[in-house]
Every structure is written in C-alpha cells, then in structure tokens.
Amino acid sequence: MHEILEQLDSALAVVLSGLDARQTQLTPRLNPEKWSIQQIVEHLLLSYRSTAAVLQTRVDKGSATRASPSLQQRAGQLVVITLGRFPRGRLAPAEVAPPMRPTSLRDGAELTRRIKDDLVAMDTAAQSAEALFGSRRSASHLVLGPLSVQQWRKFHLVHGRHHVQQVRRIRQDYQV
C-alpha cells in the first residue's frame, strides 16, 4: 500500500484500538445527533469504495477525465490538499453518508480490518490509474473536481485525519 495510505491506516487503527462494539456506538457527548464512531468509519469506508470505483471506471475506459476544475474547486483543492485543512461542519455527500442505524454493531478491531481491506482495494485502483495516467488529473471528486491520483491519496489522508480527531474527541468525552 502507498505510504500515504499506510499513514492513514495506522492513524485509524490507533484511534479505534481497544473499542468494543458498544463503545463504537458512542457519539459526541454535547452533540448526540452527530455520527457515532462506527458511522464515522462507515462514512470513510464508503468514501474509499467510491474512490476505488471512480478510479477503476477511468481505468476501464482507458482515459483520464477531461474535466478542468472550476475556480471554487481549485480553492477547495488548495485548502484541503495543499494546506491539509479540512472544513468543519460540511455535510457529507449523500453517496458517502453512513446509514442512520448500523445493520450490525462492530468493534474497533473489526472496523480496523474493514478499513485496511478497503484501503488496499482503493490503492489497487489508484496504482492502476497512476500507471495509465501518471500525474495527470485522472478522475473527479464529488466536491473538489478533477484530481490526480496523488491528490486523491492526499485528500483521503486529510479527510481521514479530520475524522480521527472526531473519534479522539468522542473517546475523550467518555474516557474510553
């Protein structure tokens, strides 16, 4: 797996370590309507699967996106990818929003395994796209527009770190 994705995998594994299935259902103490730890992870998993699918689609077509980023998308890319800042309070696109109620409760170890599996699958698609398209913009992100494979990796690292901080705050709220 690419080193950027390994960093992400490691950070998520640390923050999920030792949580039982009941603890992964905890939400922020002051905002219980916000996502639980498990929902945060399910959101990340959906984002990895979405990225893998969009990259694989471009690989299957044998051509990178021809789209150019808008001024707003360029600004978003600067903030998120270049500066490493993820905006707070933004609603997730519906395609990557977790279900309101999990179908089954999962502990931290199971969530960590799922993260690893999906990161490996996403990395496989990313490597294929990078082999075909090099450093060109390969596929479009729902909000940030067309990104290169390296930009996709950096996006996921910044996005993942944002959610790692959320999980840390929930753990601190309950001292778990």
Image (cartoon, rainbow, N blue to C red):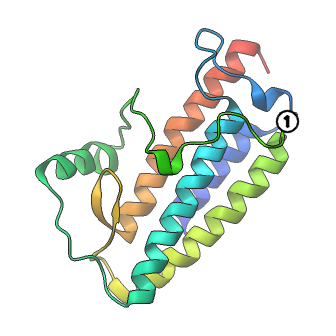
Looking at the image, residue 89 sits to the left or right of residue 145; the answer is right
Compared to residue 75, the image places residue 6 above or below, namely: below
Residue behind mark 1: 18
Name the one closer to the observer, 50 or 15: 50
Which residue type does callout 1 highlight? Gly
Name the one closer to the observer, 83 or 149: 149
Q: Residue furthest top?
A: 30
Looking at the image, residue 18 sits to the left or right of residue 75; the answer is right
Which residue is depicted at the point 62% across and 38% down? Answer: 40
Which residue is depicted at the point 83% across and 47% down? Answer: 109
Looking at the image, residue 102 sits to the left or right of residue 39; the answer is right
Quadrant where the C terminus sits is top right
Residue 8 on image: x %, y %? 58, 52
Secondary element under disc 1, as helix, strand or loop, is: loop
Residue 88 on image: x %, y %? 40, 28
Compared to residue 164, the image places residue 1 above or below, namely: below
Q: Residues within 10 Å of mark 1 (few under 14, many from 20)?
A: few
